[in-house]
Amino acid sequence: MSKTLINTFSKKLIAWHGVSGRSGLPWQGNRDPYAVWVSEIMLQQTQVATVLERYPRFMKRFPTVKKLAAVDIDEVLAEWAGLGYYSRARNLHACAKQVMQEFSGKFPNDPIILEQLKGIGRSTAGAIAAFAFHERAPILDANVKRILARLFAIDGAIQEKTVNDRLWQLASDLLPTQPENMPVYTQALMDFGATWCTARKPVCISLEKKCPFAKECQANLSDQVLTLPKKVAKAKSPEFDCDMLLVRAGNFILLQKRPSKAIWGGLWSLPESAWRPKTEKSHKRAPALKELLTMTLPKENILGLAKSIKELKQGNQIKHIFTHRRLWMQIWEGRSSKALEFLGPDLKWVPLSQLGRYGLPQPIKILLQGLSLARGDDLKN
Ligand code: SF4
């Protein structure tokens, strides 16, 4: 059974795509490896609807790998703001430089070499090689893992190495024999996982449409569609809290650059304290001004700012949910009597009218817009 499926899968899938696949997406049918690469990275943890809006904008601002490599990382992060998972933007920038320096501005076509580039994993390397160079390279993202685990009723959690290795082997075995079919096949696989063999409502369960693999799909035949693929159970996300300073001086606001390896790495944000595990007692007692400044600012800036700020008022508490943790941010609002002094490369007074030039974490951007400290327009430009 599996052998027949292996021999016929790519043909059937390509035929399915001709009738039911997605079309008209701006990154489709493009053989420019730069354009393919940007779309693949952007699509990794972002909904297609959002990428449809942001991808053309990104490509307009950075139309070539040369342009992207030449700009400052702050520009890339500002353009990426709101898309989340900022390590993707930092890796895009680092990879663009690598392509310029080590490959004279030309992406390599070998998936094994592509995989050595910053931020490009094996599946993304496969997608770039297949779309741009028609290489017979497999992809194995979460959607493809789900399709294969169901088609071949793969038992065992997909995070396990042996299961993952087996899935990669199957992904290779199923490739079309003709290299020129690689772009349509790869796109079809992505589309089939995103629209028909979906996680919660695959067409064979909802009975909306007739799946072309219904008679060979082992999960369908053994009534395991919704239990495959198996995953290791997730632990409950830990909760943290922290204090943040929202200090204004006239039309300026105090911003701090986050360390590049931290969450929201390299973005500009409000000065913040270290994260603490959240407890019942969190924020029951308002800290004193000096204590707050000590928790949130570099040592050399505390004294000067303490003199210029009269008091800090307790503002909103904002909750933000990350993939693996939750953060409660307590905002403390204050006014300083003096701006325009140099505080250091990673701590500065930013004019409200120039906030749009800075990459800000999404909840901070929303907070500032909510307080009318920045207009939506300021933050888009
Ligand atoms: S029969 Fe269902 S589970 Fe199997 S491939 Fe088709 S949609 Fe997916």
Image (spheres, rainbow, N blue to C red):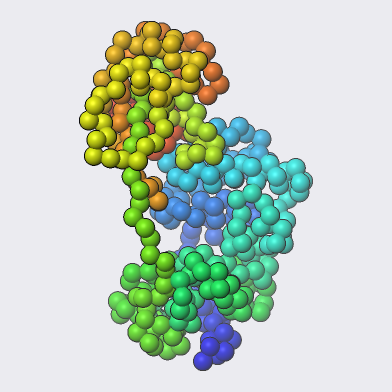
The relative height of residue 46 versus residue 281 in the rendered view (above or below) is below
The relative height of residue 96 versus residue 347 in the rendered view (above or below) is below
Left or right, 286 with reference to 234? left
Foreground of the two, 335 or 195: 335
How far across and how far down the image is residue 55, in percent?
A: 50, 48
Instruction: Please report the residue visible at 68 percent of the width from the left and 62 percent of the height from the top.
Output: 111
How far across and how far down the image is residue 2, in percent?
A: 53, 88
Residue 212 appears in the rendering: no
Instruction: Please report the residue visible at 64 percent of the width from the left and 49 percent of the height from the top.
Output: 118
Foreground of the two, 163 or 32: 163
Residue 161 appears in the rendering: yes
Left or right, 29 with reference to 233? right
How far across and how far down the image is residue 369, in percent?
A: 32, 30
Count of labels in the image: 0
Q: Quadrant of residue 168?
A: bottom right
How far across and how far down the image is residue 23, in percent?
A: 48, 64
Q: Quadrant of residue 235?
A: bottom left
Foreground of the two, 250 or 37: 250
Left or right, 191 with reference to 202? right
Instruction: Please report the residue visible at 33 percent of the width from the left and 37 percent of the height from the top.
Output: 241
The relative height of residue 337 versus residue 213 in the rendered view (above or below) is above
Q: Quadrant of residue 248?
A: top left
Instruction: Please report the residue visible at 41 percent of the width from the left and 12 percent of the height from the top.
Output: 305
**Ligand 1 located in image quadrant:** bottom left
